[in-house]
Amino acid sequence: MRNEAYAGKKGDYAVVARGVEKSYGNLKVLKGVDLRIEYGKVACILGPSGSGKSTFLRCMNHLERIEGGYLQVGGEMVGYREHRGKLHELRQHEIAAQRADVGMVFQSFNLFPHMTVLQNIIEAPMSVRRMRKGDAIDSAMALLDKVGLTSKASSYPRTLSGGQQQRVAIARACAMKPKLMLFDEPTSALDPELVGEVLNVMRDLADEGMTMVVVTHELGFAREVSDLVVFMDGGVVVEQGTPDQIFNNTQMARTKAFLGRVL
């Protein structure tokens, strides 16, 4: 059952990208990305290594600065404001405030090793959201129950499996009650037998109506859970559509060639 508290106004867009560009030195990684993602939807981004998928995802919370085009998340321009026709980068505290509304789950978990699982989850809500400790603990324990890890609240990350660490990372991101969740190949660092437990948590979030953008190689997950499948290559969106359109009736030869190799 979808939770409308996650979804924003029906029909509104959580992400709007127009002609987004990004380079590293002479290497142009994003060459004009166009994409719109509605609130309450799950978008899975597929593509070969080096296609710009993760870079584009990192641009959504200003971990990477765009150098051309327009990128809006949650109705606000990411990292910039426009004044008299010119873009001005936001101050660090303003960027931090934007990031507070965008959860991100990385490949490598990024948990604080010196903190317990519970401490990892309550840190940001208390320091950024100014949540009372008791309320933060109650929320954290509810999230740990959701990801099946209440018994690990007092454990340290080093004692957990990779799948357990990633589930804690998801709970930590959800603790901030974000408007948008970004997943950067969240299962790529996991042993194959641990992938399913992480994908199941993500399925539950999708069922609740969380707006999600997922860079993934898990094509079964993309086919089953996503509302929108996006295929990127060469720094652009080559094709996008429903799972049925992309997996069963793709129109672009490049998409067809990619799927033919990985399916």
Image: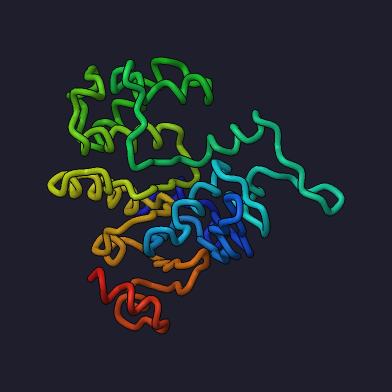
- Identify which residue, 184 or 121, lies in the foreground: 184
Q: Residue 99's x, y, as percent?
A: 55, 37
Q: Residue 76's x, y, as percent?
A: 65, 48
The residue lying at 48 percent from left, 21 percent from top is 131
Judged left or right of residue 134, residue 62 is: right
Judged left or right of residue 67, residue 210 is: left
Extreme front residue here? 26
Colour pattern: rainbow
The residue lying at 53 percent from left, 58 percent from top is 29
Extreme right residue here? 84
Question: How many marks on residues?
Answer: 0
Q: For the C terminus, give its image quadrant.
A: bottom left
Q: Residue 108's x, y, as percent?
A: 33, 37
Q: Residue 98's x, y, as percent?
A: 59, 38
- Identify which residue, 162 or 144, lies in the foreground: 162
Which of the 4 image quadrants contains residue 152? top left
- Identify which residue, 69 or 199, lies in the foreground: 69
The residue lying at 42 percent from left, 68 percent from top is 231
Q: For the N terminus, give its image quadrant.
A: bottom left
Judged left or right of residue 158, residue 254 is: right
* Vertical position of residue 35 compared to residue 126: above or below: below
* Vertical position of residue 151 compared to residue 33: above or below: above
- Identify which residue, 139 or 72, lies in the foreground: 72
The residue lying at 36 percent from left, 31 percent from top is 110
Which of the 4 image quadrants contains residue 167? top left
